[in-house]
């Protein structure tokens, strides 16, 4: 009788032990900053003069440049239109000092 009760108890405990599932969730938040370009190094970094002061952003592996209306800019247009003094918005992930830009939006069409 003791063997039967012990077997039943072990069967119940084993069910709970195998039934446990571990789950990990990673959340990435994209944030936006805006200001006027004070420094710009293509492929490396951009510094914006924001209301809180100058903020430095690093560029990710791929950065998309678009106009306010959403038109994607080609490389030649980026070279002529993205420069010091131009107002922009940037989409980035991370927190200071590791803010990584993935999209630059020119405030002009």
Image: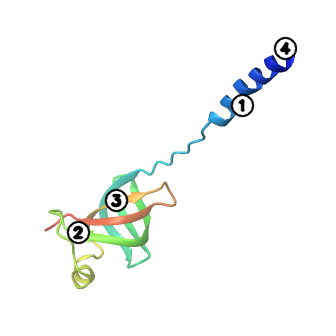
Q: Earlier in the sequence, mark 2 or mark 4?
A: 4
Q: Quadrant of the C terminus?
A: bottom left
Residue at (50, 56) in percent of width and height: 96
Closer to the eye: label 2 or 4: 4
Circle 4 sits on which residue? 1
- Which disc, if any, is residue 14? 1
Along the viewing direction, whichever of 25 and 37 lies nearer the viewer: 25
Along the viewing direction, whichever of 1 and 84 lies nearer the viewer: 1
Residue at (72, 27) in percent of width and height: 11
Percent across and percent down for residue 54 are 40, 61
Q: Earlier in the sequence, mark 1 or mark 3?
A: 1
Q: Are marks 2 and 1 in contact (CB under 8 Å)?
A: no
Residue at (50, 48) in percent of width and height: 26
Q: Residues within 10 Å of mark 1 (few under 14, many from 20)?
A: few
Measured along the vertical axis of the image, is residue 54 above or below residue 46?
above
Image-based side of 65 in relation to 61, left or right: left
Circle 3 sits on which residue? 91
Q: CA distance from mark 2 to mark 1?
A: 57 Å
Measured along the vertical axis of the image, is residue 27 above or below residue 100?
above
Percent across and percent down for residue 101 are 39, 64
Q: Are marks 3 and 2 in contact (CB under 8 Å)?
A: no
Measured along the vertical axis of the image, is residue 14 above or below residue 76?
above
Q: CA distance from mark 4 to mark 1?
A: 20 Å
Q: CA distance from mark 1 to mark 3?
A: 49 Å
Closer to the eye: label 2 or 1: 1
Circle 2 sits on which residue? 66
Q: Are marks 1 and 3 in contact (CB under 8 Å)?
A: no
């Amino acid at each position: 009788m003791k063997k039967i009760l012990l077997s039943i108890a072990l069967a119940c405990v084993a069910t709970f032990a195998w039934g446990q599932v571990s789950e990990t969730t990673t959340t990435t938040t994209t944030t936006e900053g805006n200001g006027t370009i004070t420094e710009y190094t293509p492929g490396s970094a951009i510094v914006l003069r924001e209301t809180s002061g100058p903020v430095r952003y690093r560029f990710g592996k791929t950065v998309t440049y678009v106009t306010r209306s959403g038109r994607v800019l080609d490389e030649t247009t980026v070279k002529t239109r993205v420069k010091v003094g131009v107002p922009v918005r940037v989409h980035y992930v991370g927190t200071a000092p590791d803010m990584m830009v993935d999209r630059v939006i020119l405030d002009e069409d």
